[in-house]
Image (cartoon, rainbow, N blue to C red):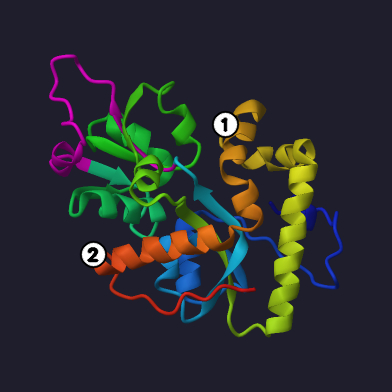
């Protein structure tokens, strides 16, 4: 998404960008403190920073019929198996999750209600389930593509479930911009980010190659497949469908008392 900005391949209109590459949990925490002018955050976290930030309609990650998945080790044939919709079985398991401010965690709360969990970095969840530190793992990022090869079986795909329930994509990550930035500047920055995404999609090979140092042991073919899941038309502009998905996701969570705060959801136009 940011290849064109990082490499000055588009007109930056006199603005200078300093890129901070950090994991989503760290970015969520920094957004809570209002530290960064523009940041990627979990849509879940936006509920707690809506007083400081507005949502940009580009740069989001939405799973349209797919998303975070719950996995377990491929079991012994005699082992207890999940019931038809898996919920009762899952509520009795310890579930390793990649942070309580992630959208994956909130989606799981909407699916299950209360459950037992242990918080781990996302890239340690497979190992934790393998070693018996957790019974089930909530998998995000490239693990959604590699879980079977790693010896795990899928229980449920939360993006698939959400699509079936609501008809909407599951809003996972988004970009936010501080509200104290003047409206004209916010509009400029939105246009620059959209141009960068467009450039990356038009020059996909170069943009994928630029991203490979951050691909966490994926080869280029797998990285390209993963990028295709989350850098697409929704990323360029998620439009009214994306806005509806965010409002429904956070609204349902507030109604179910899974979030205790939800300010006005503001989108930059």
Residue 230 among magenta residues: no
Which quadrant is home to the C terminus? bottom right
Residue 79: give x, y in percent of width and height. 14, 20
> To which quarter of the image does residue 49 belong?
bottom left
Q: Secondary structure at mark 1?
A: loop
Query: Tag on residue 217?
Result: 1
- Looking at the image, residue 179 sits to the left or right of residue 129; the answer is right
| Place of residue 42 in the rendered image (x, y in percent of width and height, measured from the top left) | 46, 59
| Quadrant in the picture for residue 230 | top right
Side (left or right) of 180 relative to 34: right
Q: Which of 126 and 227 lies nearest the eye of the viewer?
A: 227
Left or right, 249 with reference to 240: left
- Quarter-wise, where is residue 91 in the image? top left
Q: Nearer the viewer, residue 234 or 134?
A: 234
Mark 2 crowdedness (10 Å alpha carbons): few <14, some 14-19, many ≥20: few
Residue tagged by mark 2? Answer: 256
Residue drawn at (51%, 64%) of the image: 243
């Amino acid at each position: 998404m940011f290849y064109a900005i990082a490499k000055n391949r588009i007109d930056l209109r006199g603005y200078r960008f300093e890129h901070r590459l950090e994991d989503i949990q760290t970015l969520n925490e920094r957004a809570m403190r209002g530290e960064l002018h523009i940041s990627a955050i979990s849509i879940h976290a936006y509920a707690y920073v809506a007083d400081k930030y507005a949502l940009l309609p580009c740069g989001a990650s939405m799973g349209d019929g797919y998303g975070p998945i719950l996995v377990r080790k491929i079991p012994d044939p005699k082992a207890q198996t999940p019931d038809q919709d898996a919920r009762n079985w899952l509520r009795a398991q310890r579930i390793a999750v990649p942070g309580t401010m992630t959208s994956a965690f909130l989606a799981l709360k909407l699916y299950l209600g209360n459950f037992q969990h242990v918080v781990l970095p996302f890239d340690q969840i497979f190992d934790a389930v393998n070693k018996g530190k957790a019974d089930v793992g909530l998998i995000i990022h490239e693990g959604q593509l590699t879980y079977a090869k790693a010896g795990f079986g899928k229980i449920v795909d939360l993006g698939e479930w959400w699509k079936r329930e609501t008809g909407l994509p599951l809003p996972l990550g988004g970009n936010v911009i501080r509200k104290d930035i003047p409206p004209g500047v916010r509009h400029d920055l939105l246009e620059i980010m959209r141009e960068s995404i467009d450039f990356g999609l038009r020059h996909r090979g170069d943009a994928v190659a630029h991203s490979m140092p951050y691909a966490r042991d994926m080869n280029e073919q797998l990285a390209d497949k993963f990028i295709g899941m989350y850098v697409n038309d929704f990323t360029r502009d998620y439009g009214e469908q994306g806005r509806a998905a965010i409002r429904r996701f956070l609204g349902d969570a507030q109604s179910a008392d899974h979030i205790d705060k939800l300010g006005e959801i503001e989108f930059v136009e």
